[in-house]
Image: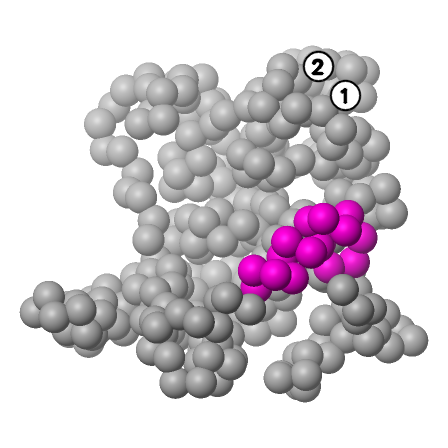
Amino acid sequence: MPALPFGPDGTLRLPEHPTVVIHRSQLSPIFTCGDERSTAYHRRHMPRGYLTNAVISNTVEELEPTGLAMLRRTLGGVPVWPIGPLVRGVPTSVSDKDDDGGSDGTILSWLDTQRPSSVVYISFGSQNTIRANQMAELAAALESTGRPFVWVVRPPVGFDVNGAFRDEWLPGGFETRARAGGRGLVVRGWAPQLRILAHAATGAFLSHCGWNSVLESLTHGAPLLGWPLAAEQFYNVKMLAEEWAACVEVARGNLESSDVERSRVVEAMEKVMGDTAESEALRRRVAEARQVLSRAWAEDGGSSRAALHDFFKAMHLL
């Protein structure tokens, strides 16, 4: 794979879309430091995406007009139907078990004791994790802010992400201090994400910004603190921060060279959850994004409803 034409400042302009500027650190590692076999695999399969006859996308026309316009221009007339947001509803039955089979009673009961919009929910998804030293910095930032939190932890980079979590990966006494002060919960492996995001106490979601998590967060009106780790997550954060002003990036990546500073994490949390005009403007933008997602399925002209109707017509299902 030929070297990408980075500028001296580490930025890259896309040949097909010269107005888009991407920094080296916003590219998935597969393009910058992947091993030869995985890079060759992606190089071989990416052109096949141009052979499609149509695209169905889990997004909303009004949420991503720039990205959808780029996709349509790149595919050269291939129909693109955005039919999102495809977000599972929050279970309405009162139970100690979520649909995924995990116990959520302790988490939700704890959230019930917190003030509205005061809790930071932290999760990097089911397939992503950060480094042990990054966990330490994040833990230090949480203690520094004093804000209540629910942190879903998985083993750090270099270990089985679905394996057992060891106490040694967090600073000594961190979890005990958080529980004793009623300030936070460390959850090992799984948490009822939709119920947490829907809870009135949740004020922000520190996320890897995988697209499912983004849609779940915006659907429930939770501002995002972005920490992209892989795949398209870097571009999701870029769009959310630059086009919607609904996200603040706290760190980027989980490579050995990926820096994370506790002061930056603290600053980002205050931007999202503070009582400043900047914080209020961000929350307002998140509320606007939530309305956009909701209106997309309105019976009187919702864009996603219309796109799905067009898809059915094209498939001769109507």
User: 71 or 129: which is nearer to us?
Assistant: 71
Quarter of the figure that contains the N terminus: bottom right
The Cα–Cα distance between marks 1 and 2, rounded to whole angstroms, is: 6 Å
Figure check: 268 above or below 106: below
The answer to whether any part of residue 291 appears in the image is no
* On screen, residue 122 above or below 293: above
Q: Where residue 200 appears, x then y in whole percent?
A: 41, 40
| Residue at image point 38% right, 53% down | 219
Report how many numbered discs are placed on residues in the image: 2
Considering the numbered disc 2 on the image, is that residue within a helix, a strand or a loop? loop
- The image quarter containing residue 277 is bottom right
Q: Which residues are magenta?
A: 30-46
- Estimate the x, y position of residue 161 in percent, counting from the top left: 63, 27
Q: Position of residue 229 (x, y in %)?
A: 67, 48
Crowd tier of the residue under label 1, counting other residues whose Cα lies within 10 Å: few below 14, some 14–19, many 20 or above: some
Q: Position of residue 257 (x, y in %)?
A: 87, 47
Secondary structure under the numbered disc 1 in the rendered image: helix
Report if residue 302 lies within the magenta region: no
Q: Which mark is residue 166?
A: 2
The residue lying toward the viewer, choosing from 197 and 309, is: 309
Q: Which residue corresponds to the image point at 66% horizontal and 24% vertical from the top-left?
A: 160
Amino acid type for the residue under numbered disc 1: Trp
Mark carried by residue 169: 1
The quarter holding residue 254 reads: top right
Whether residue 78 is visible here, answered yes or no, is: yes
In the image shown, does 169 or 198 lie closer to the viewer? 169
Q: Are marks 1 and 2 in contact (CB under 8 Å)?
A: yes
Q: Is residue 22 left or right of residue 191?
A: right
The amino acid type, in three-letter code, at marker 2 is: Arg
